[in-house]
Image (spheres, helix red, strand yellow):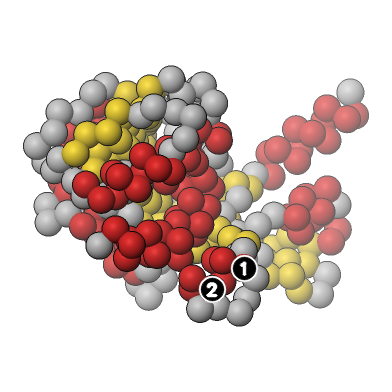
Amino acid sequence: TLSEKRAYLSARQPATLAAISRVLREVPGEVTELLDLGAGPGTGLLAAREIFPSIRRAVLVERDREMVALGKEMVQGFNPEWVIGDLSRVELPLSDLGLMAYVLNELEDPAPILERAFQACRILVLIEPGTPAGFERILRAREQLIALGGSVLAPCPHNRACPMKAPDWCHFAARVSRTREHRRAKGADLGFEDEKFSYVIVEKGGSLRGISRILARPQLLKGHLKLKLCTEEGLKEEVVTKGAGPLYRRARKSKWGDLFSKDVIEDREQESEE
């Protein structure tokens, strides 16, 4: 029912909004057109408009009429084009940015839909729950999109096969502050929660960034710290000692999911000397 969906959204939407916002900040350049597939109540549009005020057109595809009704209540000050229908049947307009957030797990056969979305969008963003199963779905989609000619923008610094092996899986976290209403809806005591997610951003014919990504919370130890990195060459544990000066200070401020490059530090040091 509509009231049940409203209750579900009050419990879940803050976390999914935080995860989508965190991922969309990785998208380079300006975005004027958004295509959100499996849009639910328009959470993706809320996140995208905050990050890309340049958005002029948004097409939101959702098969659940009640979710669309809730979305029309929530998305104020902007008039997106709502398309009620099945993703496998609706026509997909050309767009700068395509988003499929928490959708792959609902599709029996995502491959044909992914191909159509990739053809329609310059950049395609996929987000799934940060579980082993969610990561597997992202991994399969990543392989398909690379085979179609896509370049991975994030989180990977390369287009090669993922070096992560079970029981590990690639996932990240977005911290969400809980309001009193949110705590009540979740039946929770803590004033925050961490939304775990896996994701991939693929650009049609783009170029690779090649910058390493921090895959876990940095381990701060006596006189040094350890970073688990995904690099162009594969997985690597980077040990940064206090003696590294600026690099150590930057590493201490780094967080799980951040990009990390020694070159950035070296470039800055050279600039300060000049």
Residue 39 can be seen in this image: yes
Image spot of residue 252 (x, y percent): 76, 59
* Residue 73 in the figure: left or right of residue 106: right
Q: Image quadrant for the N terminus?
A: bottom left
Q: Image quadrant for the C terminus?
A: top right
Give the numbered dot on residue 170.
Answer: none
- Secondary element under disc 2, as helix, strand or loop, is helix
Q: Which residue is mark 1?
A: 180
- Secondary element under disc 1, as helix, strand or loop, is helix
The residue positioned 37% from the left and 59% from the top of the image is 6
Quadrant in the rendering for residue 81: top left
* Residue 51 in the figure: left or right of residue 147: right
Image spot of residue 90 (x, y percent): 13, 33
The residue positioned 22% from the left and 34% from the top of the image is 83
* Residue 180 in the figure: left or right of residue 128: right
The residue positioned 75% from the left and 55% from the top of the image is 253
